[in-house]
Amino acid sequence: MDVRVIHLKRYFGTTRAVDDISFEFSAGNVFGFVGPNGAGKTTTMRILATLDDPTEGHVYINGVSLVDNPEKARCCVGFMPDTLPAHRDMTVHEYLDFFARAYGLRGVKRRGVVDSVEQFTNLSGIRDKFLRALSKGMKQRVSLARAIVHDPPVLVLDEPAAGLDPRARIELRELLRVLADRGKAILISSHILTELAEICNGAVIIEQGKILRAGPMEQILAGGSARRTVAIRIKGETAALHKELLQVPAVREARVVGEVVEIQTDGDEEIHCDILAHLVAKGFRITDFRQRQIDLEDVFMNVTKGEVQ
Amino acid sequence: MNRAWEPVSGRCDAPAAPGGPGGQRSQGAGFLAWARAGDWVNPVAVKEFRQAVQSRWVIGVLLIFLLIDLGIVGGYLAMTPEAATSSHGGRDVCGGLLTILLLTCIAFVPLYTGIRLSLERNDTNLDLLFVTTISPGAIVRGKYLTAMALTLLMFSVCMPFIALTYLLRGVDLPTIFFLLAHGFLFCAVANGLGVFAGAVSGSWFIRGVVDLGALLGLLYLAVVATALSQSVLMFGTGMVFSHMDWSEYGITLLIAGLGLGLLYVLSVCLLSPRSSNRMFVPRLYITGSWMLVGILMIALSHWERTPWPIESWVVCSGAAFAVLMVAALGERDAWSARVRQRIPRHPLLRLVAFVFYTGSAGGVLWCVLLYGITSVTARLWVGQMGLATTSFENLCGTTSFVFGYALCYCLTAAVLRVTVLRSVAPINVAATAIFVGVGVWLVPYFTAFLLSSDRFEEPSWCLLASPMVLATDDDAAKAAAPVLIAAWLCVGVWGGLAWMLGQFRRFTPYHAVRVSTEGNPTTAAGDGSDPATGAAP
């Protein structure tokens, strides 16, 4: 099962909500969809869920076009929107049962599936509560349960972790890992980038409807910035170390942060080894020399400008 | 969270929750059979029934309705000393009960159904109905079924009280059954109208116009249903049956049935994806209905040797196709790959498909063709049968004038579309035609009224650009109207030709899209057009 987004465009009048984006992800992968507010994430996800039509471009799920055959593609996609279910006069169980019926599940199978999804998402205890009476976190779970009730091979989750408490977030992460292990292709948008980085194999960074970075996570992190940050701690005066480091040609920037001197270099680990050897040769007694890992948050801050249309 | 979830096989590793469907397997065979039958009921209907029985709004209305019925019967019995001996007590109470029943069913149930569907079509709630594999037809049927079940519930609440009126004398059982059956038919049409209005989406203007039309339709149905029930109660079914024109009655029922079917296909069309060939089925249905009614009217005219059935056919067709023509302007003017894949390759079939498929220029052409055929057939038939009268000529002429004006407004909107309104959404072209029609009627009229020294003089010449000129007494202005329409049509057709031909050029078959495993999708036959919009390279 693979999902391919090809030259997708969605315009609202003069606003280019999605402006010619292309990316793909496949079964067993969790793909992060990252961008500032108004970047076009929800619009893209709504198109993937067949709730909106693109102005131009195509989305294929296993070769089936969402534009040409939205009805056929719907059985392959489970969509969790950023708006939560708040329908009147409906309990959690009735809500899930309706979707199971709507996806064509019948009889014992339907009852079994609804029960097991309720168990899976910890909804069994509140199955007879009305949707309107639920907290935001509980509604998120109902929404997720709804998205997986027909066991779709592709899951499109729009901000699933928003409003969840820490325990529920960890549980959600676990759940997504289980789903990915079962061969689901998952596209997930979130503003909590540290969590995304932990579970995603790949990511798309989008701003003003355009893709800024896309690909496997290693590639994104590697391409985030050419500069590396190294934190150095010594036994003794940091001022002397700072002065010495500023004279090393490979060091682009050096600053004292408490008892640590942080330097930025353009080079790779070879250069770091040379710097370390140089400092030892100069007689500095180094207690800690650590390269700081670049994470998704750094890449995001580096590549986006925070502009909205 | 429990990792034991196995949705594909439907296996549930965890014990089923007590009281839930999974835990009800130990119950009797009757329950199981009932549950199995319930599996095949429309999912939307199941959801709606569940919501309706839990809705305070529905329960509140039912209770109020019950109290009003109790009040009418109890009040009559308690406050009318001659209740036991009166020969018309049953008729009076039955009239009151029926009026309350019809007003409640025709006002409340369609409004409740329409508002619920409209809320579910709202952007924030779209997930409820529109991400599943359930078809638009099933959604409409589910909503309609629930509305009819609610109506039946209302009727069943009222039934014991109406049965009591039989004991009070003044009304017979056939009359009661006749009125209940007809009341139910009126409610069926009202519910169809409610579902249709709820299915409309788009701008507030379009929804406002449709909702206003639906409300007026409900008001009309309520007034006619109540008036019919009162007159039948007054004279009794014996009198009604002995004086009834059964052919008229049959045609009225047929037209009501066809109208209900039309509301169904239009509601399905409104809920279908935008990329689909939405208007194809409604156009086929309307063409079929138009032909059926036309044949019946011609047969009736031949049988009764009178032109009135033909007159009715011409007037109704003219009004319907004028409205449909304005609505057609709001359809798409570029086709999705999904529609283009179904366009026939044969030039003649392609032309037929252009007229019947979704598309604004094709829609306008379809309306003009059908109205043209209606008008020519009517004149030929009436002339052939020697039934032509001045009244027939006037009626046909007036209808053609009104249709001609509508066509002028549509062509003007089409010309504006290709000149100054290139970037607006297609739906706004229909709104432009309405604004043109209202503008050329009201602006000159009020300008002339304000500038005129004699406020009592009718400014008939200022109404020349609208069909209202036909309602004035100024014969000179009336005589000038055909000249104006002819000139306007010539200019409109000339200007709109680019619009229509442009669409016909874009209405070309699309070669199947093949997705390569590595690169971007390519068109098999390589026509070079854009796969999503169908735009030429």
Image (cartoon, coloured by chain):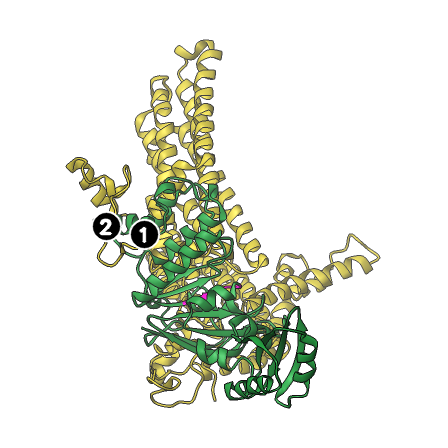
Q: Report which quarter residue B480 is drawn in.
A: bottom right
**Residue beneath disc 1:** B2
At a point 56% along the width and 50% down the height, the residue shown is B212
Please give the chain letter of the residue carrying mark 1.
B
Which span of residues is magenta-colored?
A187-191
Q: CA distance from mark 2 to mark 1?
A: 9 Å
Do labels 2 and 1 touch, CB within 8 Å? yes
Vertical order, B78 against A257 (above or below):
above
Position of residue B275 in the picture relative to residue B210 (left or right): left
Position of residue B533 in the picture relative to residue B512 (left or right): right
Magenta stretch: residue A188 in it? yes
At a point 38% along the width and 36% down the height, the residue shown is B53
| Amino acid type of the residue that numbered disc 2 sits on in the rendered structure | Asp
In the depicted view, which residue is nearer to us: A122 or A271? A271
At a point 42% along the width and 12% down the height, the residue shown is B83
Q: Report which quarter residue B54 is drawn in.
A: top left
**How many circles with numbers are drawn on the protein?**
2
Q: Colour of chain B?
A: yellow
Vertical order, A38 against A119 (above or below):
below
x, y (%) of residue A11? 55, 73
x, y (%) of residue B75? 47, 16
Given the current orientation, which residue lies at the most extreme left position? B29
**Residue beneath disc 2:** B13
Residue B20 visible here: yes
In the depicted view, which residue is nearer to us: A23 or A265? A265
Q: Colour of chain A?
A: green
x, y (%) of residue B161? 37, 23
x, y (%) of residue B537? 48, 89
In the depicted view, which residue is nearer to us: A251 or B194? A251
Residue B379 visible here: no
Position of residue B510 in the picture relative to residue B17 (left or right): right
Magenta stretch: residue A66 in it? no
